[in-house]
């Protein structure tokens, strides 16, 4: 058990969000298996309030890029505070998102706040945002374990995603996940992650499992 947990951590610590992708196609079954893994995520009342819409179509990706960059330009030029821009500066991000056309797969993630049953009755979903976030974490982990790179892209607002991915307006766009192999010349920011002591704490007596 200890060995298995160490191996998983060793694998996941190499995961990095990338912005330089290869256009090399990825195996369809790898994406399917990763989505199946995402579908195992826990959810409020087991209502599984998520939908994943996938595209590899160059025309669709081009439209997504155009609309995403329009929102991003508005963000960088008008909506973002100076403090927010300073926080982003070390990552080297800007309004240009060429990876949306280069990467072979884009996955639109949508959050469902309710659903209708066969009789047309409306049923509320519980903790849809938290549940969808958990499913995305499993999806990203599964893709990384398969040897693929990802980028979580969240242009704001994201309502244009409903039209492009042909999803009903009752669903809320949650995330645009960029998927593919990293480019041969891929570079990532020189960042550090918090140490375990910085983001965890122990309350009460220390049990043997944590000693």
Image (spheres, helix red, strand yellow):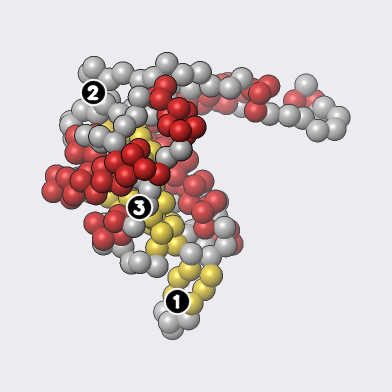
Q: Do the CB atoms of the residues marked 1 and 2 lie less than 8 Å apart? A: no
Q: Is residue 103 above or below residue 70?
A: above
Q: Nearer the viewer, mark 2 or mark 3?
A: 3
Q: Which residue is mark 3?
A: 158
Q: Do the CB atoms of the residues marked 1 and 3 lie less than 8 Å apart? A: no
**Is residue 32 at all visible to an observer of this figure?**
no
Q: Position of residue 121 (x, y in %)?
A: 48, 81
119 or 178, which is in the foreground? 178
Q: Which mark is residue 117?
A: 1
**Sequence-first tag of 1 and 2:** 1
Q: Which residue is mark 2?
A: 183
Q: Which mark is residue 62?
A: none
Quarter of the picture containing the C terminus is top right
Alpha carbon distance from label 1 to label 2 = 45 Å
Residue 89 location, quadrant: top left
Q: Nearer the viewer, mark 1 or mark 3?
A: 3
Q: Position of residue 127 (x, y in %)?
A: 57, 58
Q: Position of residue 133 (x, y in %)?
A: 49, 47
**Is residue 82 at all visible to an observer of this figure?**
yes
Q: Secondary structure at mark 1?
A: loop
Q: Is residue 202 above or below residue 162?
A: above
Q: Position of residue 69 (x, y in %)?
A: 26, 42
Q: Residues within 10 Å of mark 3 (few under 14, many from 20)?
A: some
Alpha carbon distance from label 1 to label 3 = 27 Å
Q: Look at 24% across and 56% down and name the residue there.
A: 164
Alpha carbon distance from label 2 to label 3 = 27 Å
95 or 142, which is in the foreground? 95
Q: Look at 43% across and 82% down and name the residue there.
A: 120
Q: Residues within 10 Å of mark 2 (few under 14, many from 20)?
A: some
Give the residue furthest to the left.
Answer: 59
């Amino acid at each position: 058990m200890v060995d298995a947990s160490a191996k998983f951590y060793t694998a996941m610590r190499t995961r990095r969000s990338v912005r330089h992708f290869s256009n090399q196609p990825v195996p369809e079954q790898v994406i399917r298996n990763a989505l199946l893994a995402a579908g195992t995520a826990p959810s409020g009342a087991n209502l599984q309030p998520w939908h994943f819409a996938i595209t590899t179509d160059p025309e669709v990706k081009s439209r997504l890029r155009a609309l995403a960059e329009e929102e991003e330009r508005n963000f960088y030029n008008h909506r973002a505070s100076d403090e927010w821009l300073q926080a982003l500066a070390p990552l080297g991000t800007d309004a240009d998102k060429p990876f949306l056309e280069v990467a072979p797969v884009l996955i639109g993630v949508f959050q469902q706040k309710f659903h209708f049953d066969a009789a047309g009755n409306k049923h509320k979903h519980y903790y849809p945002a938290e549940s969808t976030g958990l499913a995305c974490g499993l999806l990203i982990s599964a893709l990384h374990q398969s040897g693929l790179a990802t980028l979580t892209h969240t242009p704001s607002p994201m309502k244009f995603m409903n039209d492009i991915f042909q999803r009903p307006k009752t669903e809320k766009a949650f995330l645009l996940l960029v998927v593919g192999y990293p480019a041969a010349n891929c570079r990532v920011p020189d960042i550090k992650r918090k140490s375990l002591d910085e983001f965890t704490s122990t309350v009460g007596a220390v049990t043997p499992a944590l000693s």
